[in-house]
Amino acid sequence: MSESRPRPQFGEYASPEEQRARIAEPIDEQRAEELGIAPVVPVERQPRQQQEPTLREQTREQTREPGVVQPGAPTVAARRPVAGDRIATSILLGLGLVGLIVTMPGLLDLPGLIRPALVQMGVSGYSSDGLASAMGILALGLQIALWVGAIILSSRSLRAGRLTFWIPLVAGVAANLVVVICLAVAMGADPAFMEYVRSQQP
């Protein structure tokens, strides 16, 4: 291009770099009227609703639409509780309640329950009535708490459609362990019983 040639006004002979620089500059409405062209507004100055949504915005809108399943997304089917599991859970909870009612009188009078058992073993003179009464009340309270907890957890698990029968089963095992431990503490604290245990050792 010779220097005598007039410099173009609209970029016909501009280099690609100059064209990109000119395109980046906005043309307001007054200048556009003078040139007889439409005004040029940068992308960042356009109204947001006129801009094309980005990939992140498209993904976000798709996830908000109800009933739209994304391709390749794992579908989780709503699980329903099995009828056999519901029946087994109800039976186990009922057995737990029956066991609680049956053992309640003995736990409320644990000294009266321990003393005849020791007499049959040849041990007389049980003297730890206060400790035995406390252990009986403690065992009864823990049994009630375990049974109520099993009721609550089983109800939530059944509503969620999960396997539930193991919850009252575990609660029943734990309740029996509580009774055995409290009974062992009440009997082990009695001097006459410990003397009997030592006499049975070779």
Image (cartoon, helix red, strand yellow):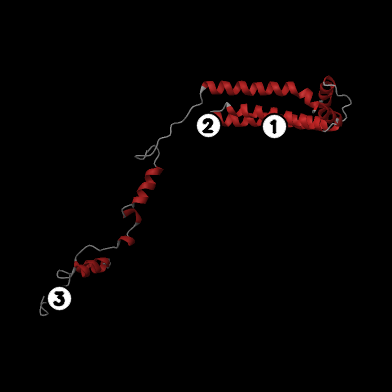
Q: Are marks 3 and 2 in contact (CB under 8 Å)?
A: no
Mark 2 burial class by Cα count in 10 Å: few <14, some 14-19, many 20+: some
In the image: residue 52, left or right of residue 172: left
Cα separation, mark 3 vs mark 2, equals 78 Å
Q: Which residue is mark 3?
A: 7
Mark 3 burial class by Cα count in 10 Å: few <14, some 14-19, many 20+: few
Which of these two is toward me, 9 or 147?
A: 147
Q: Residue at x 36, y 47 (%)?
A: 59
Q: Secondary structure at mark 3?
A: loop
Three-letter amino acid code at the position of disc 3: Arg
Mark 1 burial class by Cα count in 10 Å: few <14, some 14-19, many 20+: some
Disc nearer the start of the sequence (3/1): 3
Three-letter amino acid code at the position of disc 1: Ala
Q: Single out the mark in the foreground, 2 or 1.
A: 1
In the image: residue 100, left or right of residue 49: right
Q: Is residue 57 above or below residue 125?
A: below
Q: What percent of the width, then of the height, locates residue 124? A: 88, 24
Q: Residue at x 59, y 29 (%)?
A: 155
Q: Are marks 2 and 1 in contact (CB under 8 Å)?
A: no
Q: Which mark is residue 145?
A: 1
Which of these two is toward me, 169 or 145?
A: 169
Furthest-bottom residue in this view? 4
